[in-house]
Amino acid sequence: MARFLQGPFAPVTEELTAFHLPVTGQLPTELNGRYVRIGPNALGVDDPAAHHWMLGEGMVHGVRLRDGKAEWYRNRWVRSPMVREKLGETPPGQTQPFGSDFACNTHIIRHGGRLLAVQEDWPLPYELTEDLDTVGPLKYGGVPPGFNVSAHTKLDPITGDLHVVAYLTGVEQVQYIVVDPAGSVKHTVGVPLDGNPMMHDFALSQHHVILYDTPVVFSAQAAAAGSKVPFIWDPDRPARVGVLPRDGDHPRWFPIEPCFASHTLNAHDAGDTIVVDVVTLPAGFLVPELTAERWGALDRWTIDLTSGRVAQTRLDDRPQEFPRLNETFVSRPHRFGYTAETAALYEAYVLPGEPLPDAAFTNALIKHDLVQDRVETHHFGRNAAVGEAVFAAAGGPAEDDGYVMAYVHNPDRGAADLVILAAQDFGGGPVARVHLPGRVPLGLHGSWLPDGGTAGCG
């Protein structure tokens, strides 16, 4: 859709490198690492009216922080063979493996000593250098043909293992894959499914993998009709969650009310129950578009392993997406979560001719205290588009001892700032704003990569 080529979504046309970035405020000296985020950045579109945001070539944007200074900013396309061709560069003189010709655009993670741009379904992950240049596609040995590292992996902060649930369009099976800290596949389990649901995300607890089988499914008919995103809502398909022991090979399935599980905040075991906090979209939402009343909300699912029932509770009904947390608490009990309300994202998905809802959307980051049932909101300007934020730990004992950072459009400059908030003073002014030399289009997911650390897999 042409709307995804305009405004905050409009792709940038240049790769920039800038050093010694100007900063308003004071960068915390304990933040030593890189903040990287990826998203679609279309490189030539044949039919703007038919273009969908998710189909743009991946571009990664990164800022290097060290010793209280912002050393550099870089943005780089993920260089698949097709991207190289579009840029007029010499394609690699070697045969490329199947799945390597799409420049992954959904998430960027670090594991096994590699920085990887990843995406769900068939595209291979791409390895990048620390300076964000492309090394090339990566195929893990031991993974069944066609399956790859997915868009949303989970890193166990205690074991260092990377957990993956991968689906493949047209295949009635998902693969649960575990990659050890060295980057070698140590465990795979195929889970058969009736049909081909979109499993964009999943949840990981101390002892279980939680699978989302919802009525959003691949449609061969939609694909044959030329749909760019051939997934539909199937009202006849029941919704359910699967609980697979980490060392097991057969999940146990639990029925839930129809919805689409968009993104996981976190999950943990609590005796004979599993608690899952997740952003969901309601039954019947249109794929690939939404309607103005049907945005993501934050829910809690409590899976009772004894009774076989799932209690679904609404934690916060305001429109929000992109939940993240302090990733040292992945799969363990957590108190805090961070989400984003992005006005342009919601408005872009309103169907042509449909009015916006009465309540105007805003650009804000939201901090959820899930123990005290409190919410703090940091508002940005109406035209200051903000996307996903990530948490950077400061090394203290408290779960929220650290910083929350995100790219925010600065309308006064016509360029982006990397905004850094103190998580324990969330509603206060930014600790620092790093002024970038250009726009950063609204994108998808990213990671804070501390020096010497392994974080970055939400």
Image (cartoon, rainbow, N blue to C red):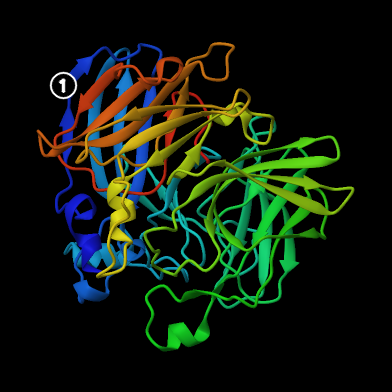
Front in this rendered view, residue 115 or 294: 294
Q: Is residue 109 at least partly visible in the picture? A: no
- Residue 100, given in percent of the width and then of the height, sits at 42, 65
| Residue at screen point 30% across, 15% down | 27
Q: Could you tell whether 7 is left or right of 225 in the image?
A: left
How many numbered marks have been drawn onto this rendered protein structure? 1
The three-letter code of the residue at mark 1 reads Pro
Q: Could you tell whether 240 is left or right of 264 in the image?
A: right
Q: Is residue 222 at least partly visible in the picture? A: yes
Figure check: 396 above or below 225: above
| Residue at screen point 32% across, 42% down | 132
Q: Quadrant of residue 64?
A: top left
- Residue 405, given in percent of the width and then of the height, sits at 36, 29
| Residue at screen point 38% across, 33% down | 365
Front in this rendered view, residue 100 or 106: 106
- Label 1 residue SS: loop
Q: Could you tell whether 62 is left or right of 312 in the image?
A: left
Figure check: 397 above or below 197: above
Front in this rendered view, residue 427 or 360: 360
| Residue at screen point 31% across, 16% down | 431
Figure check: 22 above or below 301: above
> Outermost residue toward the right?
306
> Outermost residue toward the left?
413
Which residue is denoted by mark 1 in the rendering? 22
- Residue 454, given in percent of the width and then of the height, sits at 53, 31
Front in this rendered view, residue 135 or 225: 225
- Residue 40, given in percent of the width and then of the height, sits at 31, 56
Report crowding for label 1: few under 14, some 14 to 19, many 20 or more residues within 10 A (C-alpha): some
